[in-house]
Image (tube, rainbow, N blue to C red):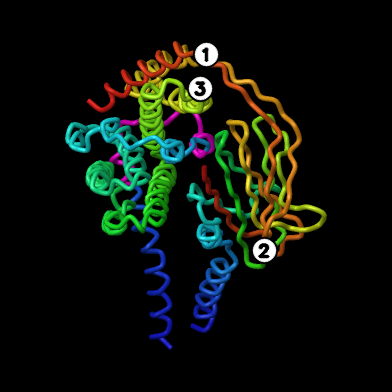
Amino acid sequence: MKTIIVLVLSILAISTLEVTGQCNSEIFSNECIPKLASGFNFLKTYKVEKGGKDYVEYSYVFTKGTQYMINICAANQPDGIVVSLYDSKRNKVASSKVEGQFIATIAYPCNTTGIYYIQYTFDGSASYCGGSALGFKR
Amino acid sequence: MRILLIGLILALFFACGSEKKTDEQAFLERLDSAGAEGPSISEGVIGDILQQIPSPLEISVLLKSSGRKYNGGYLNSPDNFSKYNSSYQKALNLGIYGTDLGYTNIYEQNQDGVKYLASIEELANGLNIGQFFDKETIGRLASNSKNLDSLLLITTQNFNSINHYLQTQNRSNLSVLFLTGGWLEALHIICEVSAANPDNKELQETIGEQKIILENIMLLLSFYQESDPNMASLLNEMQELKEIYDRVIITYTYKESEFKIVDGVMVIKDNSSSSIEITSEDIAAIRSIASSIREKVIS
């Protein structure tokens, strides 16, 4: 009987550990929405959590004449999460890590319409878990 | 001791039970999309392309910020919703009404917005995605123009949730149609506004820039051309549009960007530039074909 109870309790404990150990990036993404600067309209949230690759990448068509804002939210913000922006030819347009400093928000007034790649990387991150929001204004 | 053991087993049983319920729901939802065979490419790749499509709200904001007046005559009548019986029609027109709702919201035309909201709810319920559209909250926010930011936020979140849900349920075909409808309506509106303001270069360039989005939409539709005759037919019609857009030339010159930090925000200075070559004949042809495709979709 004792063995069964220990077994059942172990299963429950492992399940709980798995749940608490998971990255709930949606919470961080949602935290980022109200942090978009005034005047910016919300467009999308992005989950930033380490998967099989060293980076997480999304893409979006940016429009000339529109200003975009991308921010990062994490437990110890920005927790080593770096956002880099690449244009359609994969030229780097921006990176939120500069001279060793991590910037949590970038604003990009777009001059050329096209597909842009929003890439998140981890540089000394403790949790490899965060979220991000994208907004725009004219 | 025995009670404790029974309690633990019951807890495990119910934990598994809730998972089973989700599976049943998923099965029932799959039945709803029966008849639509899978695409010729993975749902993940489709999702990656879908996420690139810009929000039609950007077009409405552009129109308002450039001083164009509201014109409800550009929009699909909210009363047309009862014409749409198939999932194909519902998904396309849900996208069209979504763009129309965004347009009314941006211009704070709340009375019109409420009508679109009701039609959207009907179509969303018909596609079994009505649970993602919080009509009560949106209706309350729409009743006061001071709530514009919250209204835009919640409608965008609702539409994002619908897209995400459809993709997780392997119903990306509906997501493709939803975004196609939304884009087509935005293209139609901007073409109509441009026709009324023929000297406005910004509007002409915006029409030209839609070439990039059309390419993505055609790629998405092409994944279903073997399995879905309606989507294949829509793709054929888009091909006519593409033939005109092939004449539009977009030139891009890259130059390294600069930045400065302002109040903790990294502000980028984009030194790249682009130019768009599009003639008034091209614009007239795009307007005509887009209008013809849209007319078939909304009728």
Q: How many marks?
A: 3
- Is residue B78 or residue B201 the one in the foreground? B201
Q: Are marks 3 and 2 in contact (CB under 8 Å)?
A: no
Q: Chain of mark 2?
A: A
Q: Is residue A95 above or below residue B147?
A: above
Q: CA distance from mark 3 to mark 1?
A: 10 Å
> From which residue to which does the magenta span run?
B27-51
- The reply to whether residue B219 is in sight is no
Would you name the residue on which mark 2 appears? Answer: A127
- Residue A17 is one of the magenta-drawn residues: no
- Is residue A101 or residue B147 the one in the foreground? B147
Would you name the residue on which mark 3 appears? Answer: B208
Q: Chain of mark 3?
A: B
Q: Is residue A35 above or below residue B166?
A: below
Is residue A104 left or right of B286 when viewed as pictured?
Answer: right
Q: Are marks 2 and 1 in contact (CB under 8 Å)?
A: no
Which image quarter is the C terminus of chain B in? top left
Residue at point 45% right, 40% down? B65
Q: Is residue A75 above or below residue B241?
A: below
Q: Determine the secondary structure under disc 1.
A: loop
Q: Is residue B154 above or below residue B58?
A: below
Amino acid type, label 3: Gly
Residue B153 pos. (x, y %): 42, 53
- Is residue B239 or residue B57 the one in the foreground? B57
Would you name the residue on which mark 1 appears? Answer: B246
Amino acid type, label 2: Ser
The crowd level at tag 1 (other Cα within 10 Å; few <14, some 14-19, many 20+) is few
Residue A99 pos. (x, y %): 82, 54
